Amino acid sequence: MRIGELARLAGTSTRALRHYEERGLLAARRLANGYRDYSAADLRAVEEIRARVADGFALAETRPFVECLRTGEGTSDACVDSIEGYRRRIAQVDAEIARLRHSRERLAAQLDTACRGARGQGDVPPALPGCVLFPAQPGT
Amino acid sequence: MRIGELARLAGTSTRALRHYEERGLLAARRLANGYRDYSAADLRAVEEIRARVADGFALAETRPFVECLRTGEGTSDACVDSIEGYRRRIAQVDAEIARLRHSRERLAAQLDTACRGARGQGDVPPALPGCVLFPAQPGT
DNA sequence: CTAGAGGTTCACGCGCACGTCAGGGCAAGC
DNA sequence: GCTTGCCCTGACGTGCGCGTGAACCTCTAG
């Protein structure tokens, strides 16, 4: 198939596919007229890339998975580097969640004091908007 | 004080301070020789900016807080726009945490199946590295 | 023959918060 | 006079994942 069809099937753009090729993630055969020619395996590779990127992997970090697809035929998980990649990314996500949770706590505290002490130190300010229905952290 | 001292006191760079000025967040008087001249209030403003940025606000979004500092003398919380800002940011953080949690679950599932099915379909692969001590999500 | 829908490469744009030169001026000590 | 340390204003670089032309070629249908 050619680049347009692959883009449609993979739910992305032709520009993205050429970008993956520039980055060495995707290699296309060429037809006699210079057009790129892709196989079903290439579609799998692109789906793999998109899936990893959707989970926060940088493009360069998807490389082990793509290479694992080529050598391991069928799955991209079955390589040591892939497992390493999963673990690293999970650690990053955990760290990021922790950071955001701390940030969330600080923000909630700030909002709280802001609502209490807003302008009129002792008496209740006239229904300061945004201070009713103070939001609790979901999922806790 | 001049820009270097302010940068040291605020724990940032002179370049950052000039950048804030370009963005209209910080206005400096000028000495006779053209040097910027800052006051203690400016230090408070810079601290405010840094604090907001540290909690994920974009530079432009720190503007209400800084302006609130000028008008409200003392705190930056006591303005309606600040409270709105807190709420919006909290909503963003919550959404981001939710996204990351879903991503985390998908990643853990992938790692799990990868560790199970790695290479040798039925028999246990020779202690695939990274598959021992499968990490659980912290804080749950 | 002529559109029109595809393909090709090259190369700049973007958003964001600055880092990092380049090329100068000002004040103070030796 | 020279060095040193601080300051000034441009203006380009960075990282990332493409978007968006420009200018051109190629195949197919009418």
Image (cartoon, coloured by chain):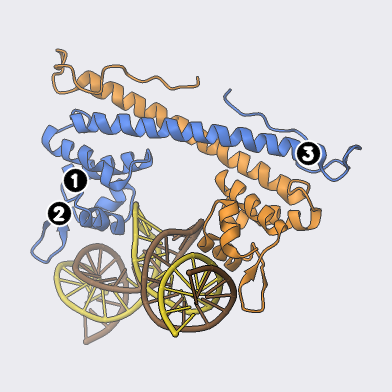
Chain colours: A orange, B blue, C yellow, D brown
- Residue at (17% x, 32% y) in the render: B74
> Which dot marks residue B28?
2
Q: Are dots 1 and 3 in contact, CB under 8 Å?
A: no
Find the distance from the CA under tag 1 to the CA under tag 2.
Answer: 8 Å
Q: Residues within 10 Å of mark 3 (few under 14, many from 20)?
A: many
Q: Position of residue C27 (x, y in %)?
A: 15, 67
Is tag 2's residue or tag 3's residue first in the polypeptide sequence?
2
Q: How many C-alpha atoms fall within 10 Å of the one at disc 2: few (<14), some, or many (≥20)?
A: some
Q: Give the structural element (helix, strand or loop) at label 1.
A: helix
Residue B48, given in percent of the width and then of the height, sits at 26, 40
Image mark for residue B115? 3
Quick check: can you spot residue B83? yes
Find residue B42 and name its label: 1
Q: Relative to C27, does residue A41 appear above or below in the rendering?
A: above
Sequence-first disc among 1 and 2: 2
Chain bearing mark 2:
B
Whether labels 1 and 2 belong to a single chain: the reply is yes
